[in-house]
Image (spheres, grey):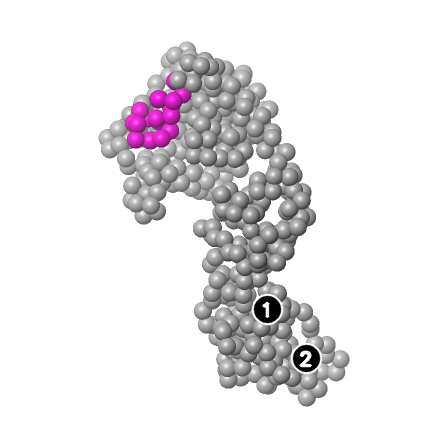
Amino acid sequence: MLDRIQQFIEQNTLFSPTDQLLVAVSGGLDSVVMANVLHRLGVKFGVAHCHFGLRAEEADADEQFVRKLAKQYEAPYFVEFFQTKKFAEQEGISTQMAARALRYEWFERVRASQGYAAIATAHHQRDTAETMLLNLTHGTGLAGLHGIRPKSGHLVRPLLAVSKPDLYDYVVENQLIWREDASNDSPVYQRNRLRLEVLPVLRDINPNLDHTMSVTAERVGAAEEIVRRYVEETAAQAQRTEPEATYLDIRLLQKTAATAVVLHELLRSFGFSYLVTKDIVQSFGAEPGRRFDSPTHQLVKDRDQLVITPRKLQKFGTHQLQAGQEALKIDGLHLRTELHEVTEGYEVPKGKAVAALDADVLRFPLTVRAWQEGDWFMPIGMKGKKKLSDFLIDQKVPLNLKDNVQVLCSADGKIAWVIGFRPDERFKVTEETKRVLVVKRM
């Protein structure tokens, strides 16, 4: 088994021979075997143990057992005592989800602070089978069917090459002692029900199920790589990312194979589900203005594009810019100012991200605020008034980006600049201007 694991480590480039690992050890059979295997392979490592505060004296005994195991291997020992139930209640999530979030966040903190190359967990072939079936039960795409990857970021799984029976054989052969976690047999947890009730039936049909699922995961992973490259090629053509939003070209999306699947891959990082993505695709032929929400983002179907913005950028408060103040940072908006004396040859900067204003016409403090219905200004080059709502329509600003439009106002209430669009005629630089306030959107 040692040779098989060594070969798996090398084939998947999990880590180099000189790397030091942080090894997650619960005290159970799987992690005890992993620590022993890595020790015998000559890998230098530290031991990390999580005490979740869920099993009273049993958990205390686990912690003492792992502490002694680390001492046996002369490995640095790290332990954290979590308030798992309190965290689960606070976040409104299950105890298992809370424990998972807590441990991986802590593992990474220890890894980074102590300089370990990677975090090793004791997942094996049976874990891959369980993960694939659990994901399939809840509904998933390719990402949920490739099971557990050998390497993901700083996480490595050196035991994925072996089965659970292999691990049992190993502890018998090497006379290893481990701790049993009674919660692994509790039917309260979905994974346990799958392990105890469903998988035994499937193994009656296919005794080699774990290996079969592992091979299937490998094939699905390869198929996912093909899809990933196709999605990347589509994104390179159809996606444009700007500071204020991400844009997707509807016409290019419509030319893709399996449009909903491809679009979902593009929208995954924005939190949109596959079912919502299907609704978005169906809206392609509808009138502009359809709005879709994910927990973190908002998407609006505009004329010929999808416009995606973070939900937190919907509204800003009112903020002041004092005379002489060089910068103003608001959530999602960063302004910088420069005051220039007008000399011979001075050139007025141009562009949507900059406004050159007559400093002596402005009244301080300036105010940055969200635009409001009823606002009007005199777009530079025009002599008459223009309702800001009409101006934004003329500029073809998508619905969800209208919510983010900010205005820079003089202390007398006049709009000096519709930020990112157009300054006001009343504050433009003229031949009589002596000082220019340049305001840049960074």
What element does badge 2 sit on?
loop
Q: Identify residue for label 1.
A: 393
- Residue 186 within the segment the image draws in magenta: yes
Q: Residue furthest right?
A: 345
Q: Earlier in the sequence, mark 2 or mark 1?
A: 2
Q: Is residue 350 left or right of residue 79?
A: right
**Marker disc for residue 381:** 2
Identity, as a three-letter code, of the amino acid under mark 2: Gly
- Residue 43 within the segment the image draws in magenta: no
Q: Residues within 10 Å of mark 1 (few under 14, many from 20)?
A: few
Query: Is 119 placed above or below 406 here?
Result: above
Q: Say which quarter of the image contains residue 89.
A: top left
Q: How far across and how far down the image is residue 225, in percent?
A: 61, 33
Please state the extent of the stretch shown in magenta in the rendering: 184-200
Q: How far across and how far down the image is residue 4, in percent?
A: 54, 17
Residue 393 vs residue 220, the one in the foreground? 393
Q: How far across and how far down the image is residue 121, in percent?
A: 45, 29
Identity, as a three-letter code, of the amino acid under mark 1: Ile
Q: Residue at x 65, y 78 (%)?
A: 380
Q: Residue furthest left?
A: 57
Q: Residue furthest bottom?
A: 432
Q: Is residue 220 left or right of residue 175?
A: right
